[in-house]
Amino acid sequence: MFDFLEDYDLLGAFWTTVQLAVLSAVGSLIWGTLLAAMRVGPVPLMRGFGTAYVNIVRNIPLTVIILFTSLGLNQTLGISLGADDFETINFRLAVLGLVAYTSAFVCEALRSGINTVPVGQAEAARALGLSFNQVLGLVVLPQAFRSSVGPLANVLIALIKNTTVAAAIGVAEAALLMKEMIENEAQLLLISGIIAFGFVVLTLPTGLFLGWVGKKVAVKR
Amino acid sequence: MTEVSVAKEDEAATGDLVVLKSVNKHFGALHVLQDIDLTIARGEVVVVIGPSGSGKSTLCRTINRLETIDSGSITIDGKPLPAEGKALAKLRADVGMVFQSFNLFAHKTVLENVTLGQVKVRKKDKKEAEERARALLDRVGVAAQADKYPAQLSGGQQQRVAIARALAMEPKVMLFDEPTSALDPEMINEVLEVMQQLARDGMTMIVVTHEMGFARSAANRVVFMADGRIVEQATPDQFFSNPRSDRAKDFLSKILHH
Protein backbone atom coordinates (compact mmCIF):
# COMPACT_ATOMS: atom_id res chain seq x y z
CA MET A 1 0.00 0.00 0.00
CA PHE A 2 2.85 2.40 0.80
CA ASP A 3 4.98 1.26 -2.15
CA PHE A 4 4.41 4.41 -4.19
CA LEU A 5 6.10 6.49 -1.51
CA GLU A 6 9.47 5.28 -2.69
CA ASP A 7 9.07 7.49 -5.78
CA TYR A 8 8.80 10.65 -3.67
CA ASP A 9 11.17 12.50 -1.37
CA LEU A 10 8.77 12.83 1.55
CA LEU A 11 11.46 13.47 4.16
CA GLY A 12 13.15 16.03 1.93
CA ALA A 13 9.88 17.93 1.52
CA PHE A 14 9.27 17.99 5.27
CA TRP A 15 12.88 19.06 5.80
CA THR A 16 12.13 22.09 3.61
CA THR A 17 9.02 22.72 5.72
CA VAL A 18 11.13 22.63 8.89
CA GLN A 19 13.71 25.01 7.38
CA LEU A 20 10.99 27.43 6.32
CA ALA A 21 9.43 27.30 9.78
CA VAL A 22 12.68 27.69 11.77
CA LEU A 23 14.08 30.55 9.69
CA SER A 24 10.74 32.36 9.64
CA ALA A 25 10.30 31.83 13.39
CA VAL A 26 13.69 33.38 14.19
CA GLY A 27 13.10 36.25 11.77
CA SER A 28 9.61 37.04 12.98
CA LEU A 29 10.69 36.84 16.63
CA ILE A 30 13.32 39.51 15.99
CA TRP A 31 11.17 41.76 13.78
CA GLY A 32 8.11 41.19 16.00
CA THR A 33 10.09 42.22 19.10
CA LEU A 34 11.27 45.39 17.37
CA LEU A 35 7.69 46.16 16.32
CA ALA A 36 6.48 45.65 19.90
CA ALA A 37 9.26 47.94 21.18
CA MET A 38 8.13 50.58 18.69
CA ARG A 39 4.50 50.24 19.74
CA VAL A 40 5.23 50.78 23.44
CA GLY A 41 7.97 53.36 22.87
CA PRO A 42 7.83 57.12 23.45
CA VAL A 43 8.45 58.20 19.82
CA PRO A 44 5.11 58.98 18.11
CA LEU A 45 6.44 58.27 14.60
CA MET A 46 7.60 54.78 15.59
CA ARG A 47 4.39 54.07 17.50
CA GLY A 48 2.42 55.08 14.43
CA PHE A 49 4.54 52.92 12.16
CA GLY A 50 4.22 49.88 14.45
CA THR A 51 0.47 50.27 14.76
CA ALA A 52 -0.02 50.76 11.02
CA TYR A 53 2.24 47.82 10.14
CA VAL A 54 0.45 45.40 12.46
CA ASN A 55 -3.03 46.47 11.42
CA ILE A 56 -2.29 46.32 7.71
CA VAL A 57 -0.20 43.16 7.57
CA ARG A 58 -2.25 40.93 9.84
CA ASN A 59 -5.38 41.70 7.85
CA ILE A 60 -3.93 40.66 4.46
CA PRO A 61 -4.27 36.95 3.57
CA LEU A 62 -0.90 35.21 3.74
CA THR A 63 -1.40 33.84 0.21
CA VAL A 64 -1.57 37.40 -1.09
CA ILE A 65 1.63 38.35 0.76
CA ILE A 66 3.52 35.29 -0.48
CA LEU A 67 2.33 35.80 -4.06
CA PHE A 68 3.31 39.46 -3.80
CA THR A 69 6.87 38.55 -2.79
CA SER A 70 7.17 36.48 -5.97
CA LEU A 71 5.13 38.50 -8.48
CA GLY A 72 5.78 41.94 -7.01
CA LEU A 73 9.21 41.91 -5.40
CA ASN A 74 10.90 39.38 -7.63
CA GLN A 75 9.30 39.49 -11.07
CA THR A 76 8.34 43.17 -11.16
CA LEU A 77 11.06 44.81 -9.05
CA GLY A 78 13.75 42.24 -9.76
CA ILE A 79 14.62 41.59 -6.11
CA SER A 80 16.27 38.19 -5.82
CA LEU A 81 17.61 38.33 -2.23
CA GLY A 82 21.12 37.39 -3.31
CA ALA A 83 20.29 34.08 -4.96
CA ASP A 84 20.56 32.99 -8.64
CA ASP A 85 18.44 29.86 -9.01
CA PHE A 86 14.67 29.90 -8.82
CA GLU A 87 14.52 27.35 -6.05
CA THR A 88 16.63 29.43 -3.66
CA ILE A 89 15.02 32.72 -4.69
CA ASN A 90 11.53 31.39 -4.04
CA PHE A 91 12.58 29.81 -0.75
CA ARG A 92 14.02 33.12 0.47
CA LEU A 93 11.01 35.07 -0.77
CA ALA A 94 8.73 32.67 1.10
CA VAL A 95 10.74 33.18 4.31
CA LEU A 96 10.53 36.95 3.81
CA GLY A 97 6.75 36.77 3.33
CA LEU A 98 6.28 34.50 6.34
CA VAL A 99 8.43 36.78 8.53
CA ALA A 100 6.56 39.90 7.40
CA TYR A 101 3.23 38.24 8.17
CA THR A 102 4.04 36.32 11.36
CA SER A 103 5.89 39.21 13.03
CA ALA A 104 2.61 41.14 13.27
CA PHE A 105 1.23 38.32 15.42
CA VAL A 106 4.47 38.01 17.42
CA CYS A 107 4.27 41.75 18.12
CA GLU A 108 0.74 41.48 19.47
CA ALA A 109 1.51 38.38 21.56
CA LEU A 110 4.46 40.23 23.08
CA ARG A 111 2.48 43.39 23.64
CA SER A 112 -0.11 41.42 25.61
CA GLY A 113 2.84 40.03 27.59
CA ILE A 114 4.16 43.54 28.22
CA ASN A 115 0.74 44.47 29.60
CA THR A 116 1.08 41.75 32.27
CA VAL A 117 4.21 43.45 33.67
CA PRO A 118 3.12 45.78 36.48
CA VAL A 119 3.82 49.44 35.72
CA GLY A 120 5.80 49.66 38.97
CA GLN A 121 8.51 47.43 37.46
CA ALA A 122 9.25 50.00 34.76
CA GLU A 123 8.98 52.87 37.25
CA ALA A 124 11.50 51.26 39.57
CA ALA A 125 13.84 50.71 36.63
CA ARG A 126 13.49 54.31 35.50
CA ALA A 127 14.03 55.52 39.05
CA LEU A 128 17.41 53.73 39.05
CA GLY A 129 18.46 55.81 36.05
CA LEU A 130 18.13 53.16 33.35
CA SER A 131 17.49 54.45 29.81
CA PHE A 132 14.32 53.59 27.89
CA ASN A 133 16.11 50.82 25.99
CA GLN A 134 17.55 49.41 29.20
CA VAL A 135 14.19 49.50 30.98
CA LEU A 136 12.66 47.62 28.06
CA GLY A 137 15.54 45.21 27.47
CA LEU A 138 16.54 44.42 31.06
CA VAL A 139 13.28 44.60 32.98
CA VAL A 140 10.10 44.71 30.90
CA LEU A 141 10.77 42.42 27.91
CA PRO A 142 12.38 39.56 29.88
CA GLN A 143 9.22 39.42 32.01
CA ALA A 144 6.96 39.93 28.98
CA PHE A 145 8.61 37.05 27.08
CA ARG A 146 8.09 34.74 30.03
CA SER A 147 4.40 35.45 30.21
CA SER A 148 3.90 35.29 26.43
CA VAL A 149 5.40 31.84 25.87
CA GLY A 150 1.87 30.40 25.56
CA PRO A 151 0.60 32.93 22.98
CA LEU A 152 3.95 32.71 21.13
CA ALA A 153 3.58 28.90 20.97
CA ASN A 154 0.22 29.41 19.24
CA VAL A 155 1.87 31.76 16.75
CA LEU A 156 4.64 29.22 16.10
CA ILE A 157 2.17 26.38 15.49
CA ALA A 158 0.20 28.58 13.10
CA LEU A 159 3.48 29.47 11.38
CA ILE A 160 4.48 25.82 10.90
CA LYS A 161 1.15 25.14 9.20
CA ASN A 162 1.28 28.41 7.27
CA THR A 163 4.52 27.30 5.56
CA THR A 164 2.23 25.28 3.24
CA VAL A 165 1.29 28.57 1.56
CA ALA A 166 4.85 28.68 0.17
CA ALA A 167 3.66 26.00 -2.27
CA ALA A 168 1.87 28.82 -4.07
CA ILE A 169 5.22 30.11 -5.35
CA GLY A 170 6.65 26.65 -5.98
CA VAL A 171 8.75 26.05 -2.85
CA ALA A 172 9.20 22.28 -2.68
CA GLU A 173 7.81 21.77 0.80
CA ALA A 174 5.33 19.20 2.09
CA ALA A 175 2.13 20.70 0.65
CA LEU A 176 3.58 21.01 -2.85
CA LEU A 177 4.67 17.38 -2.71
CA MET A 178 1.19 16.43 -1.55
CA LYS A 179 -0.34 18.14 -4.57
CA GLU A 180 2.07 16.32 -6.87
CA MET A 181 1.39 12.95 -5.23
CA ILE A 182 -2.37 13.41 -5.41
CA GLU A 183 -2.15 14.20 -9.12
CA ASN A 184 -0.08 11.09 -9.83
CA GLU A 185 -1.51 8.47 -7.47
CA ALA A 186 -5.01 7.20 -6.76
CA GLN A 187 -4.50 7.37 -3.00
CA LEU A 188 -6.18 10.62 -2.00
CA LEU A 189 -7.06 9.77 1.61
CA LEU A 190 -3.83 7.99 2.36
CA ILE A 191 -1.70 10.82 0.99
CA SER A 192 -3.59 13.54 2.87
CA GLY A 193 -3.39 11.37 5.97
CA ILE A 194 0.38 11.02 5.68
CA ILE A 195 0.91 14.76 5.19
CA ALA A 196 -1.47 15.60 8.03
CA PHE A 197 0.37 13.14 10.28
CA GLY A 198 3.69 14.74 9.32
CA PHE A 199 2.45 18.16 10.46
CA VAL A 200 1.09 16.79 13.71
CA VAL A 201 4.50 15.25 14.36
CA LEU A 202 5.99 18.75 13.99
CA THR A 203 3.39 20.80 15.85
CA LEU A 204 2.24 18.60 18.73
CA PRO A 205 5.65 18.27 20.45
CA THR A 206 6.25 22.00 19.81
CA GLY A 207 3.05 22.88 21.66
CA LEU A 208 3.70 20.47 24.53
CA PHE A 209 7.34 21.54 24.91
CA LEU A 210 6.54 25.26 24.91
CA GLY A 211 3.69 24.68 27.35
CA TRP A 212 6.23 23.12 29.71
CA VAL A 213 8.73 25.93 29.12
CA GLY A 214 6.02 28.52 29.78
CA LYS A 215 5.29 27.01 33.20
CA LYS A 216 8.96 26.70 34.04
CA VAL A 217 9.94 30.29 33.27
CA ALA A 218 6.78 31.95 34.60
CA VAL A 219 7.58 34.96 36.82
CA LYS A 220 6.31 34.51 40.37
CA ARG A 221 4.78 37.64 41.86
CA MET B 1 25.63 44.53 60.50
CA THR B 2 28.58 46.17 58.84
CA GLU B 3 28.93 49.86 58.22
CA VAL B 4 28.64 50.95 54.61
CA SER B 5 28.91 54.55 53.65
CA VAL B 6 25.81 55.70 51.85
CA ALA B 7 26.04 59.46 51.95
CA LYS B 8 28.49 61.23 49.73
CA GLU B 9 30.94 62.57 52.24
CA ASP B 10 32.89 64.76 49.84
CA GLU B 11 29.85 66.96 49.29
CA ALA B 12 29.48 70.08 51.37
CA ALA B 13 27.41 69.32 54.44
CA THR B 14 25.23 72.38 54.04
CA GLY B 15 23.12 74.01 51.36
CA ASP B 16 19.84 73.32 49.69
CA LEU B 17 19.65 70.00 47.89
CA VAL B 18 16.08 69.88 46.61
CA VAL B 19 14.20 73.07 45.79
CA LEU B 20 10.61 73.19 44.50
CA LYS B 21 9.31 76.59 43.39
CA SER B 22 5.62 77.27 42.74
CA VAL B 23 5.03 73.78 41.37
CA ASN B 24 1.60 73.12 39.89
CA LYS B 25 0.14 69.92 38.55
CA HIS B 26 -3.30 68.85 37.34
CA PHE B 27 -4.80 65.42 36.85
CA GLY B 28 -7.52 66.42 34.42
CA ALA B 29 -9.73 68.84 36.33
CA LEU B 30 -8.12 67.99 39.67
CA HIS B 31 -5.52 70.54 40.75
CA VAL B 32 -3.40 68.03 42.63
CA LEU B 33 -0.40 70.24 43.42
CA GLN B 34 -1.08 73.93 44.00
CA ASP B 35 1.83 76.39 44.15
CA ILE B 36 4.10 74.09 46.10
CA ASP B 37 7.24 75.77 47.51
CA LEU B 38 9.52 73.42 49.38
CA THR B 39 13.22 73.46 50.14
CA ILE B 40 15.10 70.50 51.54
CA ALA B 41 18.59 71.05 52.92
CA ARG B 42 21.41 68.57 52.63
CA GLY B 43 21.18 65.96 55.36
CA GLU B 44 17.66 66.95 56.30
CA VAL B 45 14.90 64.41 56.93
CA VAL B 46 11.52 65.75 55.87
CA VAL B 47 8.36 63.80 56.55
CA VAL B 48 5.32 64.63 54.45
CA ILE B 49 2.00 63.73 56.02
CA GLY B 50 -1.60 64.46 55.24
CA PRO B 51 -4.90 62.84 54.35
CA SER B 52 -5.32 60.53 51.34
CA GLY B 53 -5.59 62.42 48.08
CA SER B 54 -3.77 65.46 49.44
CA GLY B 55 -1.08 65.15 46.74
CA LYS B 56 1.81 63.97 48.92
CA SER B 57 2.65 60.89 46.81
CA THR B 58 2.40 62.96 43.65
CA LEU B 59 4.75 65.53 45.19
CA CYS B 60 7.24 62.79 45.98
CA ARG B 61 7.03 61.39 42.44
CA THR B 62 7.56 64.76 40.76
CA ILE B 63 10.99 65.05 42.38
CA ASN B 64 12.45 62.37 40.08
CA ARG B 65 9.96 63.16 37.35
CA LEU B 66 7.97 59.95 37.49
CA GLU B 67 5.21 62.56 37.34
CA THR B 68 5.65 65.60 35.14
CA ILE B 69 4.67 69.06 36.38
CA ASP B 70 2.58 71.69 34.60
CA SER B 71 4.42 74.76 35.87
CA GLY B 72 7.04 75.83 38.38
CA SER B 73 10.55 74.50 38.77
CA ILE B 74 12.35 71.71 40.58
CA THR B 75 16.10 71.79 41.09
CA ILE B 76 18.26 69.09 42.60
CA ASP B 77 21.70 70.07 43.83
CA GLY B 78 21.44 73.31 41.89
CA LYS B 79 20.50 71.68 38.58
CA PRO B 80 17.01 72.00 37.12
CA LEU B 81 15.25 68.69 36.49
CA PRO B 82 15.84 67.71 32.83
CA ALA B 83 12.77 66.98 30.73
CA GLU B 84 13.79 63.59 29.40
CA GLY B 85 16.49 61.47 27.84
CA LYS B 86 20.00 60.77 29.13
CA ALA B 87 20.19 63.84 31.36
CA LEU B 88 17.02 62.79 33.17
CA ALA B 89 18.26 59.20 33.58
CA LYS B 90 21.53 60.55 35.00
CA LEU B 91 19.67 62.67 37.52
CA ARG B 92 17.37 59.83 38.53
CA ALA B 93 20.43 57.73 39.34
CA ASP B 94 21.27 60.33 42.02
CA VAL B 95 17.78 60.21 43.51
CA GLY B 96 16.93 56.95 45.28
CA MET B 97 13.29 55.94 45.35
CA VAL B 98 11.44 53.44 47.51
CA PHE B 99 7.88 52.57 46.49
CA GLN B 100 4.82 51.53 48.45
CA SER B 101 4.60 48.27 46.50
CA PHE B 102 8.38 47.54 46.64
CA ASN B 103 8.62 46.99 42.85
CA LEU B 104 11.58 44.64 43.07
CA PHE B 105 12.39 43.17 39.65
CA ALA B 106 10.39 39.95 39.82
CA HIS B 107 12.58 37.97 37.39
CA LYS B 108 15.85 38.75 39.13
CA THR B 109 17.30 37.51 42.40
CA VAL B 110 17.68 39.82 45.37
CA LEU B 111 21.40 40.19 44.64
CA GLU B 112 20.77 40.94 40.96
CA ASN B 113 18.19 43.55 41.98
CA VAL B 114 20.84 45.38 43.97
CA THR B 115 23.63 45.06 41.38
CA LEU B 116 21.62 45.93 38.23
CA GLY B 117 21.78 49.72 38.58
CA GLN B 118 25.42 49.69 39.71
CA VAL B 119 26.52 47.68 36.67
CA LYS B 120 24.24 49.18 33.99
CA VAL B 121 24.11 52.81 35.14
CA ARG B 122 27.21 53.34 37.29
CA LYS B 123 29.28 51.00 35.06
CA LYS B 124 30.92 49.28 37.99
CA ASP B 125 32.40 45.88 37.38
CA LYS B 126 30.29 42.95 38.46
CA LYS B 127 32.47 41.78 41.32
CA GLU B 128 32.71 45.20 42.92
CA ALA B 129 28.94 45.67 42.53
CA GLU B 130 28.25 42.32 44.18
CA GLU B 131 30.51 43.15 47.10
CA ARG B 132 28.71 46.41 47.69
CA ALA B 133 25.33 44.72 47.22
CA ARG B 134 26.12 42.05 49.79
CA ALA B 135 27.36 44.67 52.27
CA LEU B 136 24.17 46.71 51.80
CA LEU B 137 21.96 43.63 52.11
CA ASP B 138 23.79 42.83 55.32
CA ARG B 139 23.24 46.37 56.52
CA VAL B 140 19.47 46.11 56.01
CA GLY B 141 19.46 42.63 57.53
CA VAL B 142 18.58 40.42 54.55
CA ALA B 143 22.02 39.11 53.56
CA ALA B 144 20.82 35.52 53.92
CA GLN B 145 18.19 36.04 51.21
CA ALA B 146 20.61 37.25 48.52
CA ASP B 147 20.03 34.36 46.11
CA LYS B 148 16.24 34.17 46.48
CA TYR B 149 13.65 35.74 44.22
CA PRO B 150 11.52 38.65 45.52
CA ALA B 151 8.33 36.55 45.62
CA GLN B 152 10.02 34.22 48.16
CA LEU B 153 10.51 37.07 50.66
CA SER B 154 8.12 38.67 53.14
CA GLY B 155 6.92 42.20 52.46
CA GLY B 156 9.24 43.66 55.08
CA GLN B 157 12.23 41.84 53.60
CA GLN B 158 11.29 42.97 50.09
CA GLN B 159 11.07 46.58 51.18
CA ARG B 160 14.45 46.39 52.89
CA VAL B 161 15.92 44.97 49.67
CA ALA B 162 14.29 47.86 47.80
CA ILE B 163 16.05 50.30 50.16
CA ALA B 164 19.36 48.51 49.56
CA ARG B 165 18.75 48.68 45.79
CA ALA B 166 18.27 52.44 46.01
CA LEU B 167 21.29 52.92 48.31
CA ALA B 168 23.50 50.97 45.92
CA MET B 169 23.36 53.92 43.54
CA GLU B 170 24.92 56.19 46.19
CA PRO B 171 22.04 58.66 45.89
CA LYS B 172 22.20 62.26 47.06
CA VAL B 173 18.65 62.08 48.32
CA MET B 174 16.21 59.26 49.04
CA LEU B 175 12.49 59.46 48.34
CA PHE B 176 10.16 57.17 50.26
CA ASP B 177 6.63 56.96 48.88
CA GLU B 178 4.56 55.40 51.68
CA PRO B 179 7.16 52.67 52.24
CA THR B 180 5.23 50.88 54.99
CA SER B 181 1.65 51.25 53.77
CA ALA B 182 1.55 47.84 52.05
CA LEU B 183 3.13 45.98 54.96
CA ASP B 184 1.67 43.76 57.65
CA PRO B 185 1.81 45.58 61.01
CA GLU B 186 4.51 43.31 62.40
CA MET B 187 6.83 44.09 59.48
CA ILE B 188 6.54 47.85 59.64
CA ASN B 189 9.12 48.25 62.39
CA GLU B 190 11.88 46.34 60.63
CA VAL B 191 11.59 48.77 57.71
CA LEU B 192 11.30 51.86 59.92
CA GLU B 193 14.42 50.83 61.85
CA VAL B 194 16.42 50.71 58.64
CA MET B 195 15.09 54.13 57.71
CA GLN B 196 15.90 55.54 61.15
CA GLN B 197 19.46 54.24 60.89
CA LEU B 198 19.71 55.89 57.47
CA ALA B 199 18.49 59.20 58.91
CA ARG B 200 21.07 59.00 61.72
CA ASP B 201 23.79 58.43 59.11
CA GLY B 202 22.96 61.79 57.57
CA MET B 203 21.10 60.75 54.42
CA THR B 204 18.84 63.42 52.96
CA MET B 205 15.37 61.92 53.02
CA ILE B 206 11.90 62.88 51.87
CA VAL B 207 9.42 60.48 53.41
CA VAL B 208 5.71 60.31 52.62
CA THR B 209 4.17 58.24 55.37
CA HIS B 210 1.32 57.66 57.77
CA GLU B 211 3.75 56.54 60.50
CA MET B 212 3.51 59.35 63.04
CA GLY B 213 5.97 57.58 65.33
CA PHE B 214 8.62 57.76 62.63
CA ALA B 215 7.83 61.41 62.00
CA ARG B 216 8.31 62.19 65.68
CA SER B 217 11.53 60.27 66.14
CA ALA B 218 13.41 60.71 62.86
CA ALA B 219 12.18 63.87 61.13
CA ASN B 220 13.85 67.26 61.24
CA ARG B 221 10.73 68.78 59.80
CA VAL B 222 7.13 67.78 59.22
CA VAL B 223 5.33 69.02 56.12
CA PHE B 224 1.56 68.78 56.36
CA MET B 225 -0.33 68.69 53.07
CA ALA B 226 -4.06 68.89 52.38
CA ASP B 227 -5.97 69.37 49.12
CA GLY B 228 -2.84 69.89 47.04
CA ARG B 229 -1.31 72.56 49.24
CA ILE B 230 1.35 72.66 51.91
CA VAL B 231 -0.73 73.80 54.85
CA GLU B 232 1.90 73.78 57.58
CA GLN B 233 5.58 73.10 58.13
CA ALA B 234 7.11 72.71 61.58
CA THR B 235 9.45 70.62 63.69
CA PRO B 236 7.82 67.35 64.79
CA ASP B 237 7.53 68.57 68.39
CA GLN B 238 5.80 71.78 67.41
CA PHE B 239 3.56 70.10 64.87
CA PHE B 240 2.31 67.26 67.01
CA SER B 241 1.94 69.18 70.27
CA ASN B 242 0.85 72.54 68.95
CA PRO B 243 -0.41 72.52 65.34
CA ARG B 244 -1.27 76.00 64.10
CA SER B 245 -3.76 75.36 61.32
CA ASP B 246 -7.29 74.07 61.84
CA ARG B 247 -6.82 71.55 59.07
CA ALA B 248 -3.82 70.02 60.85
CA LYS B 249 -5.61 70.04 64.22
CA ASP B 250 -8.54 68.23 62.63
CA PHE B 251 -6.23 65.69 60.95
CA LEU B 252 -4.29 65.00 64.14
CA SER B 253 -7.42 64.69 66.27
CA LYS B 254 -8.64 61.97 63.94
CA ILE B 255 -5.47 59.89 63.94
CA LEU B 256 -3.93 60.37 67.36
CA HIS B 257 -6.78 59.61 69.75
CA HIS B 258 -7.41 55.90 69.40
Image (cartoon, grey):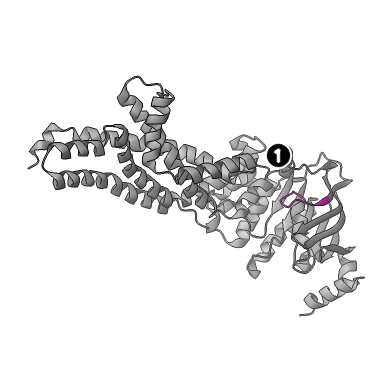
Vertical position of residue A127 compared to residue B159: above or below = above
How far across and how far down the image is residue B42, in percent? 85, 48
Residue closest to the eye, A165 or B141: A165
Where, by quadrant of the figure, is residue A165 drawn? top left
Per the image, the residue denoted by label 1 is B85
Residue in the picture at 57% in, 40% down: A49
Direction from residue A84 to residue A184 in the image, left or right: left
Residue in the picture at 80% in, 41% down: B9
How far across and how far down the image is residue A200, in percent? 26, 47
Residue in the picture at 45% in, 40% down: A29
Q: Amino acid at mark 1?
A: Gly
Residue range (magenta)? B63-71
Where, by quadrant of the figure, is residue B78 drawn? top right
Is residue B1 something that shows in the picture? no
Direction from residue A65 to residue B131 in the image, left or right: right
Q: Quadrant of the N terminus of chain A?
A: top left
Secondary structure at badge 1 equals: helix
Using the image, name the chain to which the residue with label 1 belongs: B
Direction from residue A52 to residue A183 in the image, left or right: left
Residue B66 magenta-highlighted:
yes
Vertical position of residue A30 compared to residue B222: above or below = above
- Predominant SS of the magenta segment: loop
Residue B61 magenta-highlighted:
no
